[in-house]
């Protein structure tokens, strides 16, 4: 049996005595160790150094010092006189030049240095008390005497300490015997009497027995508590006997009821099985219907007459941000606040039992507008009337319709632009040519002009002076500038009306974007009243999208138009916030996407819908032709067979998205 378990099984009195013996032994051991350590410290720090100092002063007299330094033999003779000093561990004499003349060891060799220069390092590693004393000479420098004391205490000290400890232990054992007797009388015996009484109560089950409290200490209180427990157990035993009799009577009655209950249970069990089968089928059918409703791409919401939500599918949760458990049983407006304008329509549908529809409603999801179609279906059931609301996302359809309408506009206006451009080109050419001829025929540098002026008696200098005073040259400049502007408009119209006949080729998209940004910074510095280079340009280029099939100069023209529009939109914002233009590329097979985003003034919806129409512009007269974005749209959709979209909100900037097919489309001519 382990020692710990043996100690735990000892009686209480013996445990107290064992604890007392262990405590006494520990106190004696610690006291001896402290006493020996203190004696050793006193001997090392005080007694030994003082004794060596006294010996050194006796040997440092001029007569003994001169004799000891006379020869190694004399030095050895002087050291041999110190052998009788028990605490001495080692000694050495060094002459005036630092050489060791003689040494003495008591015990093992301490390897005293042969030269006095090595004493400094030797003393750092030596833990024994040591002393270096000068030995004076009548003439010349003194010699040195090294004394090393022993660090050990004398054996008599240990013998005396052990004897005193044994005497103290013997007296302690005698006292222990007296204490043990009293502990057995006042503690162990009363506890054993309580133990015997408890065993008797357990064996005889006689709760009328009582313990006698002989003292008023803890053991006496324990006896009183034991008697109280026996009294309560006796009363509890009486209660249990009465309860047992009552239970027996109740058992007889319950057995009669149990038989009747078993007959009823058999009938109920059969009914429960039938109901369980029906409920299982209904649950499966309900889960099947819920799965069908949740798998639908439309949001389906059912409400009762009080407009409390009774049905809610996953698409409704995704659209409203309200989970199913949070929506069921709540008012519709709390679960889906954007439906507030249609409450009247919902009530009318429930009351009149007629299907109604809202063709188009626009809600914001994040920063992007999405378009939805709402359909209200009347619902009649056993629980009363209600309405089923279906919400369909028609954003893609609306965008496709807008693209189709825009494409039809482009085709119609393209044909018109081609005819108008050809009709306008001829008179424009005549205007510009004649304006140039007028300048030439008024120039005094041409010989023919001087001859005609001389023949008619007119001075060309006087004519030019008259024209200058009447500002005729400025009028000619205005004619030529207006004609040049009209010619540029016609050129844009022709570019818009013709399909590009140039072949596709692979181009480095990041390099093309950097080139467009560089040209934008040089072309649009201060010409429009703002500095393009002062704007912050963010580049977020997809490293997986580098070379794409395109017509490089046309794509560069589109990017320049978008960058210029972005810079002008930022300038029109009118505040002092820093301008920001972000250029992004993304590989989104089968498309290569390019986005140009700005933090400008943004556009209202009616402007955004017409932004790609030819000659549509929001700028002042003379500042824009309205062909930049329409030509860009034509280049992307017709020449590159891609897509071009715009998203904008007033005060939130504008984002243009270009999608170019990764497979090069076949170039066609028209």
Image (tube, grey):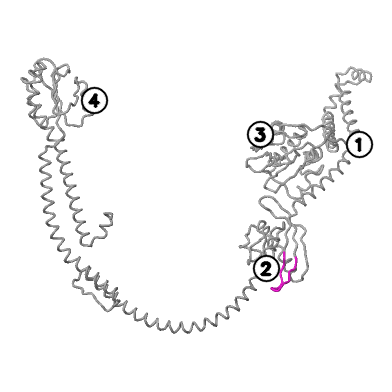
The disc at residue 121 is 4
Q: Is residue 108 visible?
A: yes
- Quadrant assignment, res 521: top right
Q: How far apart are marks 1 and 3 (CA)?
A: 41 Å
Q: Name the residue that disc number 3 marks.
A: 533
In the rendered image, the vertical position of residue 468 relative to residue 142, given as above or below: below
Residue 189 picture quarter = bottom left
Please state, as top left, top right, bottom left or bottom right, where the N terminus lies in the image: bottom left
Label 1: state its secondary structure: helix
Tell which tag, 2 or 1, sits nearer the viewer.
Answer: 2
**Residue denoted by label 1:** 423
> Disc 2 or disc 4, which is closer to the eye?
2
Relative to 334, say whether 159 is above or below: above
| Of callouts 2 and 3, the N-terminal one | 2
Task: Of the two numbered discs 1 and 3 on the same chain, state the one appearing first in sequence.
Answer: 1
Residue 560: horizontal and vertical position, in percent? 73, 35
**Stretch of the chain drawn in magenta:** 377-388
Decide which of tag 1 and tag 4 comes sooner along the chain: 4
Circles 1 and 3: CB atoms closer than 8 Å: no
- The verdict on residue 380 being magenta is yes
Q: Evaluate if marks 2 and 1 touch, with contact meaning CB atoms under 8 Å apart.
A: no
Front label number (1 vs 4) = 4
Secondary-structure class at tag 3 = helix
Viewer-nearest of labels 3 and 4?
4
Q: In this view, does 377 lie to the left or right of 225?
A: right
N-terminal of the pair, mark 2 or mark 4, is: 4
């Amino acid at each position: 049996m382990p020692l710990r378990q043996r100690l735990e099984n000892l009686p209480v009195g013996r445990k107290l005595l064992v604890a007392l013996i262990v405590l006494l032994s520990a106190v004696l051991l610690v006291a001896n160790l402290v006493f020996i350590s203190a004696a050793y410290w006193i001997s090392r720090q005080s007694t030994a150094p003082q004794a060596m100092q006294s010996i050194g002063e006796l040997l440092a007299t001029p007569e003994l010092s001169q004799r000891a330094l006379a020869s190694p033999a004399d030095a050895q003779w002087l050291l041999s006189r110190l052998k009788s000093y028990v605490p001495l561990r080692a000694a050495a004499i060094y002459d005036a030049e630092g050489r060791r003349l003689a040494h003495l060891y008591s015990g093992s060799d301490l390897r005293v240095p042969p030269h006095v220069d090595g004493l400094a390092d030797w003393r750092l590693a030596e833990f024994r008390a040591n002393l270096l004393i000068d030995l004076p000479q009548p003439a010349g420098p003194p010699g040195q005497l090294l004394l090393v004391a022993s660090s050990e205490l004398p054996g008599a000290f240990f013998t005396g300490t052990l004897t005193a400890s044994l005497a103290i232990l013997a007296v302690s054992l005698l006292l222990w015997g007296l204490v043990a007797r009293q502990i057995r009388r006042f503690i162990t015996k009363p506890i054993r009497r309580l133990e015997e009484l408890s065993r008797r109560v357990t064996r005889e089950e006689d709760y009328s027995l009582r313990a006698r409290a002989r003292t008023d200490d803890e053991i006496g209180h324990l006896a009183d508590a034991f008697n109280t427990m026996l009294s309560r157990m006796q009363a509890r035993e009486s209660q249990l006997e009465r309860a047992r009799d009552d239970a027996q009577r109740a058992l007889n009655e319950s057995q009669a009821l149990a038989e009747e209950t078993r007959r009823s249970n058999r009938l109920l069990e059969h009914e429960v099985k039938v109901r369980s089968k029906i409920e299982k089928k209904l649950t499966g059918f309900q889960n099947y219907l819920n799965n069908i409703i949740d798998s639908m791409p439309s949001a389906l919401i059912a409400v009762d007459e009080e407009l409390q939500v009774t049905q809610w599918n996953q698409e409704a949760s995704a659209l409203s941000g309200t989970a199913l458990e949070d929506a069921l049983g709540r008012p519709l407006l709390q679960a889906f606040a954007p439906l507030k304008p249609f409450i009247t329509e919902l009530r009318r549908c429930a009351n009149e039992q007629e299907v109604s529809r809202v063709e188009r409603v626009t809600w914001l999801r994040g920063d992007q507008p999405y378009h939805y179609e709402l359909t209200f279906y009347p619902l009649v059931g056993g629980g009363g009337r209600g309405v089923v609301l279906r919400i369909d996302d028609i954003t893609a359809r609306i965008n496709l319709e807008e693209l189709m309408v825009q494409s039809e506009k482009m085709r119609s206006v393209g044909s018109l632009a081609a005819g108008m451009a050809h009709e306008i080109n001829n008179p424009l050419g005549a205007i510009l040519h004649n304006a140039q001829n007028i300048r030439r025929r008024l120039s005094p540098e041409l010989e023919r002009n001087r001859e005609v002026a001389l023949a008619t008696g007119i001075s060309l200098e006087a004519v030019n002076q008259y024209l200058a005073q009447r500002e005729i040259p400025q009028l000619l400049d205005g004619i030529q500038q207006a004609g040049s502007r009209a010619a540029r408009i016609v050129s844009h119209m022709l570019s818009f009306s013709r399909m590009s006949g140039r072949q596709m080729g692979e181009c480095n998209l990041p390099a093309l974007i950097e080139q467009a940004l560089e040209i934008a910074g040089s072309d649009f510095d201060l010409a429009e009243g703002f500095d393009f280079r002062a704007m912050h340009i963010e580049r977020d280029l997809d490293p997986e999208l580098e070379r794409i099939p395109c017509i490089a100069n046309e794509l560069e023209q589109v990017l320049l138009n978008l960058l210029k529009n972005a810079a002008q939109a930022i300038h029109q914002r009118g505040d002092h916030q820093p301008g920001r233009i972000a250029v992004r590329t993304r590989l989104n097979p089968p498309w290569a996407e390019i986005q140009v985003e700005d933090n400008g003034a943004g556009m209202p919806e009616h402007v955004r819908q017409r932004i790609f129409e030819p000659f549509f512009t929001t700028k002042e007269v003379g500042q824009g032709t309205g062909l930049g974005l329409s030509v860009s749209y034509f280049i992307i959709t017709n020449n590159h067979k891609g897509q071009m979209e715009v998203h904008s909100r007033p005060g939130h900037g504008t984002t243009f998205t270009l999608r170019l097919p990764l497979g090069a489309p076949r170039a066609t001519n028209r």
